[in-house]
């Protein structure tokens, strides 16, 4: 939802600035969904396939590919770990057994 909203807002602003040149804001929303998923999960192909199947807009594969590549690059440059890796580390940290304190005897 966040990716679609950001993409739609960018598409709408493009339509306002260049009415004849910018494509429909809905196309930006679809590309934004794929880009947001890619940046979060760090899996470019999965994001594109998932969004294409969800929206039945296979004609937007190239814009989704470009947006996802950019999102992946930005996420990698910012050293943002994938969400599943962060969740796994958090779960592993919470599964550590509690250590008894030395003062409690």
Image: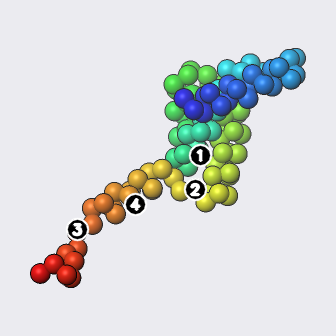
Q: Quadrant of the N terminus?
A: top right
For the residues marked 1 and 3, what is the alpha-carbon distance in whole angstroms?
Answer: 33 Å
**Mark 2 near mark 4, Cβ–Cβ under 8 Å?**
no
Rendering coords of residue 11 (x, y %): 74, 25
Going 22% across and 77% down the picture, which residue do you hit?
Answer: 101
Which residue is more in the foreground, 36 or 53? 36
The spot of residue 40 in percent (x, y) is 54, 45
Q: Nearer the viewer, residue 8 or 31?
A: 8
Q: Are discs 1 and 3 less than 8 Å apart at CB?
A: no
Residue designated by label 3: 97
Q: Is residue 79 above or below residue 20?
A: below
The residue located at (83%, 20%) in the rendering is: 16
Q: Are marks 2 and 1 in contact (CB under 8 Å)?
A: yes
Question: Residue tagged by mark 2?
Answer: 80
Q: Which mark is residue 89?
A: 4
Q: Nearer the viewer, mark 3 or mark 4?
A: 3
How many numbered circles does the render carry?
A: 4
Q: Is residue 64 above or below residue 13?
A: below
* Label 1 SS: helix
Is there a contact, CB below 8 Å, between mark 3 and mark 4? no
Residue density around tag 2, few if under 14, some if 14–19, many if 20 or more, within 10 Å: some
Q: Which residue ends up furthest to the front in the rendered image?
A: 103
Residue shown at 69%/39% (left/top)? 67
Mark 2 or mark 4: which comes first in sequence? 2
- Label 3 or label 2, whichever comes before in sequence order: 2
The answer to whether marks 4 and 1 mark residues whose Cβ atoms lie closer than 8 Å is: no
Q: Secondary structure at mark 3?
A: loop
In this rendering, the answer to whether 38 lies above or below 9 is below
- In 3D space, how far apart are the residues under numbered discs 2 and 4 (Cα atoms)? 14 Å
Left or right of 61 in this view: 81:
left
Residue to which mark 1 is pinned: 39
Q: Nearer the viewer, mark 3 or mark 2?
A: 3
């Amino acid at each position: 939802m966040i990716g679609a909203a950001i993409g739609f807002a960018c598409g709408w602003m493009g339509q306002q600035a260049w009415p004849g040149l910018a494509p429909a804001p809905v196309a930006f929303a679809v590309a934004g969904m794929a880009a947001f998923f890619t940046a979060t999960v760090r899996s470019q192909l999965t994001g594109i396939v998932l969004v294409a199947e969800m929206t039945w807009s296979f004609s937007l594969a190239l814009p989704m590919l470009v947006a996802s590549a950019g999102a992946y690059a930005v996420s990698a440059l910012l050293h943002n770990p994938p969400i599943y890796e962060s969740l796994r580390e958090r779960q592993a940290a919470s599964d550590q057994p509690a250590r008894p304190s030395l003062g409690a005897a």
